[in-house]
Amino acid sequence: MPELPEVETVRRGLETLIIGRVIRSVGVLDSPKSFPNAQGDVEEFMIHAEIRAVRRRAKVLLIDLATGYTLVIHLKMTGQLVYRGDQVFGAGHPNDSLIGELPDRSTRVMIEFTDNSWLYFNDQRKFGWVKLIPTIEVPNIDFMKKVGPEPLDADFTPEQFIMRFARRKNTNIKAALLDQTVVAGVGNIYADESLWGARISPKRKVSDVTHGEFTVLYHELRDVMNLAIEKGGSTDKNYVNAEGKRGSYMDFARVFRREGLACPRCGTTIEKIKWAGRGTHICPNCQK
């Protein structure tokens, strides 16, 4: 599943292409679960609507319409967004649907714009979705009410970061980092990378992590996420960036998927263990 940097890369790519375009038609193929919206709402609030903004909250994309409604999009594991018009854009699960003729058998939703360009939502495994919701109601979605703050927001301080973990003091630090109600958008790649950067074992309880260590972890998390956005996301097997190319962050990874290689800090062999229900990459010397 794409993490915050990957979804932010998608958002930035879409923002340059679809803002100001007007929807002419909407087609839904095969899977009503992918587009669980009443036809009357689609006709009243989507058709002839202008795209006003493309936003992101955690791992969710938000496309605001001039009608006061928002398309809330979750790519899940195999979702794609593909734009075809005066430019070609593809982002999401890296298969031939990004570059092949569309619609194809993975296409779930087709949005046609009045300038004859198209935005396709493809999803092989049908876990993703596109929901049409009044913009004013988006903050009241269960997910939005529960999700934690954005770790890259300018006004998100180290002190606020530390306070978010207070109610998870008996949880191991990696599980707490992955908890979307603590901090938004952190997944497996950037949890491993930031914990390595802060020299914190993923097995340690939150209550055992010092204030100073949390401050280092805060900066490490922000640094690796900002670098990942700069590099267009990771090359994790379910993601390509906003130009349909694989992101290059993994060329800069220090520990994730480097098991058997030398730690770039101390030279100890990096190990992969099972922790917090996920494959976890550590340096057993740096992260005792």
Image (cartoon, helix red, strand yellow):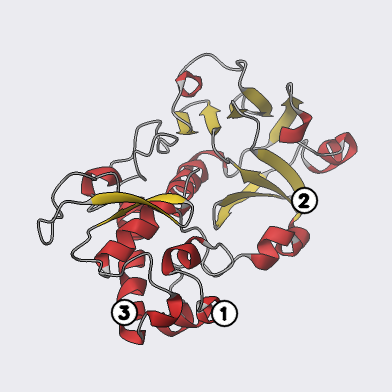
Task: Identify whether 269 is placed above or below 94.
Answer: below
Which residue carries the number 3 mark?
Answer: 213
Residue in front for this viewpoint, 119 or 7: 7
Q: Earlier in the sequence, mark 2 or mark 1?
A: 2
Number of the label disc, if any, that sits on residue 133: 2
Mark earlier in primary sequence (2, 3): 2
User: On the image, numbered disc 1 is attached to which residue?
Assistant: 167
| SS under mark 1 | helix
Rounded to the nearest whole Å, what is the CA distance between mark 2 and mark 3?
Answer: 41 Å
Going by the numbered disc 2, the residue's amino acid type is Ile
Disc 3 secondary structure class: helix
Residue in view at x 23 percent, y 45 percent: 258
Give the quarter of the figure containing the C terminus: bottom left
Please state which amino acid type lies under the numbered disc 1: Arg
User: How far, Cα to Cα, is label 1 from label 3?
Assistant: 18 Å
Foreground: disc 2 or disc 1: 1
Return the x and y of residue 217 as percentages of the image width and height. 33, 72
Q: Is residue 180 above or below residue 107?
A: below
Percent x, y of residue 169 = 50, 79
Q: Residue at x 77, y 40 (%)?
A: 46
Q: Does any portion of residue 228 appear in the rendered image? A: yes
Return the mark for residue 154. none
Of the pair 67 and 251, the residue shown nearer to us: 251
The residue sitting at the right extreme is 40
